[in-house]
Amino acid sequence: MRLAIAPRRLRLRTPIATAHGTVDERELLDVLVIGADGVTGAGEAAPLPSYDGVSLDDVRAALEDCRPILADADGLPRERVAAACREAAVLPQAFAAIDLALWDLEGRRAGEPVWRLLGAPAPAAVEVNALLGAEDRAAAGVQAAAARAAGYRCVKLKAGLGDDAGRLAAVRALAGPEMAIRLDANGAWNVEQALDALVRLAPAGIELVEEPVHGVAALRAVQEATELTIAMDETSAGPGALDSGACRAVCLKLTRCGGISGLLDAAARARAAGTEVYLASTFDGPLGIAAALHAAAVLGPLRPCGLATLDAFAELDVDPALAVRDGVMQAPSGPGLGVRA
């Protein structure tokens, strides 16, 4: 098999402010695995340095370590090739691209969508949330009203940025009483600050709070002190975090887990610890979103997933198979991942 790597830059229509800093563009690596039979599998590497501390150069170097393995991989089972590449690449953000490409390749050779290869009986509808990235209350309210008009039943509001109460009140007023609102603090608080914030914000109605604090012990302390559902996000990458059962929920990201294979393994570990699982994107490209939807068809998450992020990119012609309709997405039914970047 031949490995091809090409950089790609996607600009956001509107910068998104988080506790990690502002995201205004995404730099990805498009990855192709080309078999001797000419069939090609496509994947993408989508590290986000401000989120996971991994640079694009780190990922490119890790992908190059997989090149000699793939060169001798024609005719070998996907699982064997994937295991060797996972060991060589080390970084899950790099292996994710290889994993996606290998699943896409297998699906295209078989003429089947990846969700069917994974054992799902149908692509399944995946409810998704709208992301509200505005830093001021007026703009947040406008975004909430637009999400409601588009049929979303859940929105996510970044927290820990200042005026959280004002923005949340504006969102509740314009999203309506039935809208589920989740907060994402990206670890902006310590335990005392988090508990104080949740007491002040809870009356507006909160579905859950993602990563109010960093670390297993701190998350456990917050969860034990509140009736709200606390979800682990960034902390989930730490040793033993998924097995800890520290929170009621965990938000898993395909890139950080190491592709479809790593995501399914992470979900199994979290569920074994009694933790609910849902999925989200770190502003992945089309292949990453498609892959997450294929995984969701198997996992059947009960909460809305943060996968409706492709429309945030300027000048990206989104594949109709990845469209959001009334707050719902579905895994593509074409061969492999069912889309091209």
Image (spheres, helix red, strand yellow):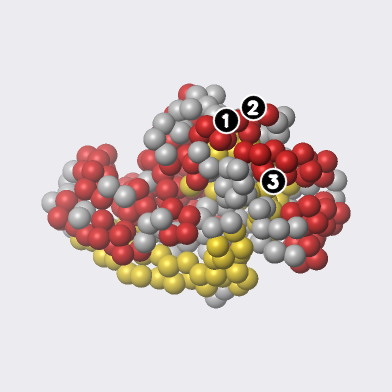
The residue singled out by tag 2 in the image is 224
Q: Secondary structure at mark 1?
A: helix
Q: Nearer the viewer, mark 2 or mark 3?
A: 2
Q: Looking at the picture, how far across and down is residue 102, in whole percent?
A: 31, 50
Residue for point 31% across, 64% down:
57
Point out the image quarter for the N terminus: bottom left
Query: How many numbered circles does the render carry?
Result: 3
Determine whether label 3 and label 1 are within 8 Å by CB.
no
Q: Residues at badges 1 and 2 in contact (C-beta under 8 Å)? A: yes
- The residue closer to the viewer here, 10 or 124, is 10
Please tell me whether mark 3 or mark 1 is closer to you in this view. Answer: 1
Identify which residue is drawn at 52% across, 27% down: 245
Q: Tell me the kind of residue under disc 2.
A: Glu
Q: Secondary structure at mark 2?
A: helix
Q: Which residue position is annotated with label 3?
A: 182
Can you give x and y, in whole percent of width and height, for residue 131 in the image?
Answer: 65, 56
- The image shows residue 214 at horizontal and vertical percentages of 53, 42
**Residue marked by disc 1:** 220
| Residue at point 77%, 39% (across, down) | 199
Mark earlier in primary sequence (2, 3):
3
Compute the Cα span from label 3 to label 1: 19 Å
Question: Which amino acid type corresponds to the residue marked 3 in the rendered image?
Answer: Arg
Rounded to the nearest whole Å, what is the CA distance between mark 2 and mark 3? 19 Å
Q: Quadrant of residue 340?
A: bottom left
Q: Are marks 2 and 3 in contact (CB under 8 Å)?
A: no
Q: Residue at x 25, y 50 (%)?
A: 89
Crowding at dot 1, Cα within 10 Å, few <14 / some 14-19 / many 20+, comes out as some
Residue closer to the observer: 246 or 115: 246
Q: Is residue 56 above or below residue 267?
A: below
Relative to residue 161, is residue 35 drawn left or right? left
